[in-house]
Amino acid sequence: MKKPQRPEIDVDYVSKLANLPLSDKEKALFKKQLKDVLTYIAKLNEINTNKVEPIAHIADLVNITRGDETSPSLSQDDALKNTSKTYNGFFEVDAIFEEQ
Amino acid sequence: MKYEPVIGLEIHIELATKTKMFCSCSAEYFGAKPNTHTCPICLGLPGAMPKANRKAIEFTQKFGSAIGCKLLLSSKFDRKNYFYPDLAKGFQVSQYDLPFAAQGILEIKTETENLKKVRITRAHLEEDTGKLTHATINNRRVTLVDFNRSGVPLMEIVSEPDMESAKEAKLYAQKIRQIARYLGISDADMEKGSMRIEPNVSLRKKGSKELPSYKVELKNINSFKFVEKAINYEIERQSKILDQSKVPEQETRGFNEQRGITVSQRSKEFAHDYRYFPEPDLPLLNFTDGQIEKIKSVLPELPDEKYQRFIKGFNLSAYDAEILTREQKTAEYFEEAAKAGEKARISPKVIANFIINQKPDTETVLPADLVSRIYQKTKTAYVSDEELENIVKKMIDENKKAVQDFKSGKNAALQVLVGAVMRESKGNIDPQKAKAMLKNLLTN
Amino acid sequence: MKNILDLTIRETSDLLFSKQIKAQELTQAFLERAHGVNKKLNSFITICGGTALKQAKKVDELIANGQKLNSLAGIPVGIKDVFSTKDIKTTAGSKVLENYIPVYDATSVNHLFNANACIVGKTNLDAWAHGSSGENSDFGPTKNPYDLSRVPGGSSSGSAVSVASGSCLAAMGTDTGGSIRLPASFCNVVGIKPTFGRVSRYGVIAMASSLDCIGHFTKTVYDNALVLDVTIGEDGFDSTCIAQKQDVYSSDIEKGVKNLKIGIPKEYFENLDQRIKRLILEAVKKLEKLGAQVEDISLPNTEYGVATYYIIQPSEVSSNLARYDGIRFGKTREKFGSEAKRRIILGTYTLSSGYYDAYYLKAMKVRRLIRNDFVKAFKKVDVIICPVSPTTPFKLGEKTSDPLQMYLADIFTVTANLAGVPSLALPCGFMNYLPCGMQIIGPDFSEKLLYQVGHAYEQETKWYRVKPKI
């Protein structure tokens, strides 16, 4: 576990990870603004939580599952309705090359 | 070879549930028109939320139990975050640190007939992605996406790197497939894509006990034959690199069927930071000891158990037992026939033989009918040794060329003569007996 | 007769069922009002005239046939533009979805339509529900009807304003860190953030999945209970929605507050505008006069609320916004606004390799401590009363250049989301003609009690009669 020494975000790396194109101006601005936020967030280091269980789910529900019965699917038209980038019933994107 | 292979297998099996993992779309999408088996949930539309398929969980626990895993009392789903056009939500709901099953052992019979234990790290449940196909439209290269497969339940089985050859890897994978089919949880068909194998291959100095510092993951392998081929190619490729005192790069390589080689795939470095966190939209799954025990206790007879029982109980050879228990359907058919055979006083051995050699259509021929067929052939059309000798001599006379070929060293010609004898006797002879007699007469 | 736009749901419903007014007339009046004020207030992104009148026509037919209908039939409602509405554009306030048309309805919307409510329109909001002021919308800020130079609060800005300005009688919203309670407080309306899991989230564009609550705005407390009676219910789609412990929220609302124990948490009364403090303590005094008892309590981990929230929420946001890749719907990701981009970057970072334990996991632990504070407090008291905002409605543009300052505006509201407990925000007075609200927080599933307490106070004060001058 890396303990953040000087909270700073490598915005270049994170924006790639987040698939979020940013201009240089945005990168610089966010780096600064988020530095302030991270410094504030570091407040949590004041509390000792060694013996505390994290809350993953706030409601006390467990074992919520459903049976294996089919329901009608969307029509192909409805599935494709919200984009014009389609071809013969498929969604179309620019070619992805997997081999070098 | 101065290196020994260190091989682990990651196997994905599409579960044969009626519906998808987190929605009620039909999971039987094979052959359907694109994007006709989708809904807001598996299409990742804004606002959609998952609900877990209980049957898929049961199947996974059943399978985990069958491969000797411990079933966890508390389990959860986690989000695996990455971007790819076939991943509708931009994350896959999978399992990270609390899979349904962990720490199992699978015993396989190696090529040298030894028993080898392969350790299973885990068996967990996740959802499948959509399918990508590459095409050229109006001179433009594009990728087409079909989300019919998106959300289908996928069980992932991860083994420890315990396998030491491509053959072993294939045998392990075959055993996994056999168990999945026996349990009825999947048709585990590599051609249909309901079973996918990704080997991890690396090499270490022979005799070393340490795990190599790298491993290469292989993808795009579409049959058992190619599993072996890809791994063997990879072993050789890595040997050459190690021979140069270099270390093979840790990477993912795709198998190219036409060229029979593996090729480096575009580096998806960021893909490795999946930012796992517990899926907030799916509550925990807790099981009692009683429920876990029940799963174990209602497992059907597994292939290895059946194999042993056929040898002991029906007095079959290991060879016959192996063939008959390869698929559950065949085994069941044999047992039914054996039961019917009891009354007609026809031994299980004869029945086994008949099924293995004559390959009757088990769909249309009822086991009881099979037995009466055998009865017809063996009891009424009895061929005496004298008659056999006559037929054999006749065939030697009528097949001069084959006889000459055999005498001049072409052993395959013997089979031609055996075939002739079988046809003449209308199949009522033990072919081994005919062969022996022919050989005897021809070599003296 | 009073202006029909100024009536409550209960009063309007009476008029409809006594056939003194037709649903179509009613809906038409509200549509005209909505169109009339939208240029000034910008509270609607889409006004659904056609659909609303069709729904109203159906109600008139049902009433003419003597059908017994429930209390929301024919009632004009607004819906925050993060709720999926079939065949009606749903934008999340963002250019990324400016042309997106859902092929299904959110469950809560379904409930409203099954109850024959009439949809006036999709209301404006901080894009993706990211914001506390209503200034983050890609379709222009919403204005506070009580002072057009000030913010209405966010992120459910349009919904609060549409009720406050008489464009509808109820409006749906979401509350992840205060996004219903804050605009309710700034706009002199009643807003409920129910217990987490009380109302199905299915079909609502997710912000932070472990924090999002589906709630709504109305003029009065009783109206608010009427709407909750309709929007609750398990749906088979939301695995975190709780079917049990449901109540009829609108019955027994007159119960009163005799012997009710009210807790005043000291941490919520430090660093607070003194005028707000005074108004809230006056409100509490009124409840004491009605028979309640007051006790000082402590919620010691309050100061960690914002930090905890601003780790968990952006982390989940970064994952929930991953699906917006322009392939199946919407525009591509560079069209996200600054605040969305900021939160995606922050959340991706806090979940990334090496940082998960220090941030998300740590925050989930502190979250348990914050919840424990409430659980402990509710052993001593029945409800907690405290402020919603540390400030009065601020001026447009005042906090937009400093994200951290904006985040700190959530200081009194995030704790209820972290703890999962319900909170009712309602008007408790004015300062310089600017609305001020207070929160009544209760234990899990205590919405009925919150309504009883709120109603008792409201009947003494009736702040909803103070209309904005637009």
Image: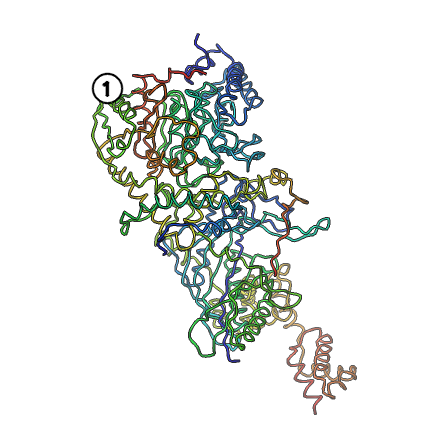
Counting labels gives 1
Q: Chain of mark 1?
A: C
Relative depth, front residue between C57 and C278: C278
Q: Residue at x 69, y 73 (%)?
A: B427
Residue C47, can we see it?
A: yes
Which quadrant is the N terminus of chain C positioned in? Answer: top left
Q: Residue at x 57, y 67 (%)?
A: B227
Task: Check disc 1 and give the amino acid type.
Answer: Leu
Q: Residue at x 63, y 71 (%)?
A: B357
B74 sits to left or right of B216 = left
Q: Position of residue C230 (x, y in %)?
A: 43, 27
C166 sits to left or right of B332 = left
Q: Position of residue B232 (x, y in %)?
A: 57, 72
Q: Position of residue C45 (x, y in %)?
A: 53, 27
**Looking at the rendering, which quadrant does residue C407 occupy?**
top left
Q: Position of residue C438 (x, y in %)?
A: 32, 26
Q: Which residue is mark 1?
A: C290
* SS at circle 1: loop
Relative depth, front residue between B36 and C321: C321
The colour scheme used to paint the residues is rainbow
Circle 1 residues within 10 Å: few <14, some 14–19, many ≥20: some
Relative depth, front residue between C389 and C51: C389
- View extreme (top): residue: C1
Residue C232, can we see it?
A: no
| C104 versus B354 height, above or below | above
Relative depth, front residue between B299 and B277: B277
B180 sits to left or right of B442 = left
- View extreme (bottom): residue: B444
